[in-house]
Amino acid sequence: MANMNPKKNPMPVQDSAVRSRNFDEVALGYTAEQAMDEAKRCLNCKNRPCVAGCPVKIYIPDFIARVAEGDFAGAYRIIAEASSLPAVCGRVCPQENQCEGKCVRGIKGEPVAIGRLERFVADWHNANASGSVERPAANGHKVAVIGSGPAGLACAGDLAKKGYAVTVFEALHLAGGVLVYGIPEFRLPKAIVQKEIEGLKALGVEVVTNTVVGKTVSIDELMQEQGFEAVFIGTGAGLPKFMGIPGENLKGVYSANEFLTRINLMKAYRADSTTPVQHAKRVAVVGGGNVAMDAARCAKRLGAEVYIVYRRGMEELPARREEIEHAMEEGIVFKTLCNPTEILGYRNEGDRRDPKNGFVTGMKCVEMELGEPDASGRRRPVVKEGSEFVLEVDSVIMALGTSPNPLIKSTTKGLATEKWGGIVANEQGLTSREGIWAGGDAVTGAATVILAMGAGKNAAAAIDTYLQGK
């Protein structure tokens, strides 16, 4: 019998006062009973608008119908046909703008909790699945994937299922890309990422870490000397942006990339860390996206009083509403319509006049107001005259976006790139070089995990067509 409740089953979560002091996962997940009840809210629409909203085209109503019946293994098989990382996507995808944003139940109430159900199914599978994975028969072709983030893993997974010998090259010592260095443990436990990667290895994917393509080995060497017939570039966008304001060279000023990498990958918050991060008392995080929320919530867990500084209003914050709400519940202060103009500091306790290479003591800001819409359609923030003030902080984290690292383009002849650094590629990911594809943030700039996965899947299909045609 259909469940016509207009609201989703709520997601159980840690109490905000408790979770703001630990790095354990905030969302606790549905029980089997909650998942089955939520699944019965699905109307199994004839036109399936939710599938159209999914970048990797999971057959959503089909897997939800299995959940409603209690056939969780069957539900997982349906998801796994399209997605290589279901436990990841169920946690970090912006479903509200994608599959759930298209759900018919959302017209007069809340959409079906598709993301929560995907997470439940993936977690159930990881906890209950047994037995080895059957490897597809080898087809005799070799493909190199550069980068083990969501785009690279999705591409590698789809190619491995078709029998390709896939080798993934990762610059860091641990595979996972942004999934391990960028997204905090309390949103995406790293054990889950590694479980998904182990699943790809079981299909035959080889993962080679500590290899910086462009330094350790070039793309041309991979193709000409190591026998790879095609290459997919999924190196992401890890080059941080700064504002260019005075004081950004002070000690205690981080890019969000550095701060999150040290927290997530290097566990710098632990007392026994060999590379400890500063435990600041008052932290300003400049930016309003998901990365800003992640950085702010990590700083909060290190014991700081934390401010989100964003030049537009609350309604314009680009981060997911769920992440904003969680940050507010945890006591993070939002200073919107506010923009930094200078970071203040001193060299040492005896000389507060020299701000060069010293320590942060505050951030000079101005209040903003929204004017006429800009080219993107958002109202442009303008400075409110006479509104300058100083926010007293001892650390600043810049979460202003990223761009692709220039290493690949500078070491690969004939690879066309955009002025801002992105690799030029068509809808299938084909670049200006024959046999080389690219996708994800390396092409589009910083975007979402699921969009990167979609690009990886598209490229895998195109590589398969290309090599089979050869």
Image (cartoon, grey):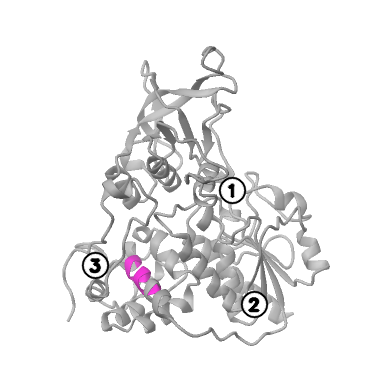
Q: Amino acid at mark 1?
A: Gly
Q: Quick one: label 2 or label 3, which is nearer the N terminus?
A: 3
Q: Quick one: label 1 or label 3, which is nearer the N terminus?
A: 3
- Categorize mark 1 by other alpha carbons within 10 Å: few (<14), some (14-19), many (20+): many
Residue 391 locus on image (x, y percent): 39, 24
| Structural distance between the alpha carbons of marks 2 and 3 | 38 Å
The quadrant of the rendering that contains the C terminus is bottom right
Task: Kindly give the residue lying farthest to the front in the view shown.
Answer: 272
Residue displayed at 50% across by 51% down = 264
Q: Amino acid at mark 3?
A: Arg
Residue 201 locus on image (x, y percent): 59, 74
Left or right: where does residue 435 sit relative to residue 359? right
The quadrant of the rendering that contains the N terminus is bottom left
| Structural distance between the alpha carbons of marks 1 and 3 | 38 Å
- Give the foreground label among 1 and 3: 1
Left or right: where does residue 430 sit relative to residue 200? right
Residue bearing mark 1 = 238
**Range of residues picked out in magenta:** 115-122
Magenta stretch secondary structure, dominant? helix
Residue displayed at 28% across by 55% down = 14
Residue displayed at 69% across by 72% down = 143
Label 3, secondary structure: give it.
helix
- In the picture, residue 96 is in which quadrant? bottom left
Q: Amino acid at mark 2?
A: Asp
Position of 220 relative to 181 (above/below) = below
Residue bearing mark 2 = 464
Residue bearing mark 3 = 105
**118 falls in the magenta region:** yes
Residue displayed at 38% across by 33% down = 372
The answer to whether marks 1 and 2 mark residues whose Cβ atoms lie closer than 8 Å is: no
- Give the foreground label among 1 and 2: 1
